[in-house]
Amino acid sequence: MSAQVQEEEPLEPHTGPKGVIHDWRKFKLESEDHESTPQKKRELLRQMSNPKSNNDDNPDRINRKMSIQEYEMIQEEDEQCLRKYRRQCMQEMHDRLSFGPKFDSVFELDSSEAFLKTIEKEHRLTLIIVHIYDDAIKGCDALNNCLNSLVVEYPSVKFCRIRASATGAGERFSDDVLPSVLVYRAGEMLGNFICVTKHLNEEFFPADVENFLNEYGLLPEKEFAACPDDEEDDEEIGVE
């Protein structure tokens, strides 16, 4: 009976100093690349990460002394793995504190009904940015490409696009007002921008659209960014 209860008990993150150490050791072992890491190095890392492995009765292991090169190798591996572990913990904390749905692409709305449903039924905390476009209008394709890039940096924002002819009010979206951008939250319109390209350079990029929206305070804070240590890792890889 006790064994059954133990199997059904959910796995939870460990708390307290000992729990953190346990999670760190587990993360380190799981993050090892067993395909690319030499057997000798893997064994050293395993011994350092799991002190129980040092309690066997193998006399060779008991009497063996670690060389300076091996110590430096382990120390460097520890530092890199610790940075990855820290970033993972920060990401998990960020995910727990984030509210509302997340999106990873621009949604194509194919009718006025889909447009209204998106505005009225979406989560009340979700910011909705809708691009009304026409393939024949200059600037519409470039703005669509910009939104495809911004969705990566602002996953809490629901970016949408709809052809003017599909809105059911094509006469209101003539060539001289496209591309247009509408911004909503909780069913309320926060922004209504016609002929957006007039506010941008002839050739514009995602950062230009981002700055334009930020001028009106329409974008939230950017989502979780990598730690500064990420840059250090990249530099180390470049050096090697």
Image (cartoon, helix red, strand yellow):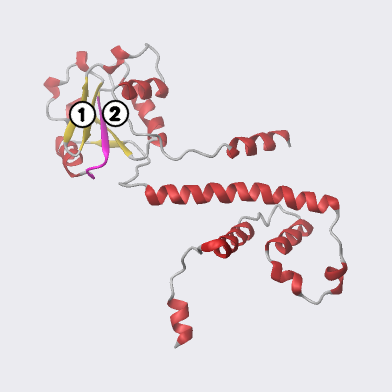
Which stretch appears magenta? 123-132
Query: SS for tag 2?
Result: loop
Query: SS for tag 1?
Result: strand
**Quarter residue 132 falls in:** top left
> Residue at image x 75%, y 70%?
54
Tell me residue 208's x, y (percent): 39, 20
Tell me residue 76's x, y (percent): 72, 47
Binning the other alpha carbons within 10 Å of mark 2 as few (below 14), some (14 to 19) or many (20 upward) gives some
> Residue at image x 39%, y 17%?
204
Residue nearest the observer in this picture, 161 or 224: 224
Q: Is residue 79 left or right of residue 72?
A: left
- Name the mark on residue 218: 2
Residue nearest the observer in this picture, 240 or 17: 17
- Name the mark on residue 33: none
Binning the other alpha carbons within 10 Å of mark 1 as few (below 14), some (14 to 19) or many (20 upward) gives some
Amino acid, disc 2:
Leu
Tell me residue 196's x, y (percent): 28, 17
Query: Circle 1 sits on which residue?
Result: 190
In the displayed structure, would residue 217 be above or below residue 230?
above
Q: Quadrant of the C terminus?
A: top right
In the displayed structure, would residue 178 be above or below residue 25?
above
Tell me residue 135's x, y (percent): 28, 22
Q: Residue furthest front?
A: 17
Q: Main secondary structure of the magenta part?
A: strand
Amino acid, disc 1:
Leu
Calculate the distance from the C-alpha at mark 1 to the C-alpha at mark 2: 8 Å
Q: Is residue 150 left or right of residue 50?
A: left
Residue contact between numbered discs 1 and 2, judged by CB atoms under 8 Å: yes
197 falls in the magenta region: no
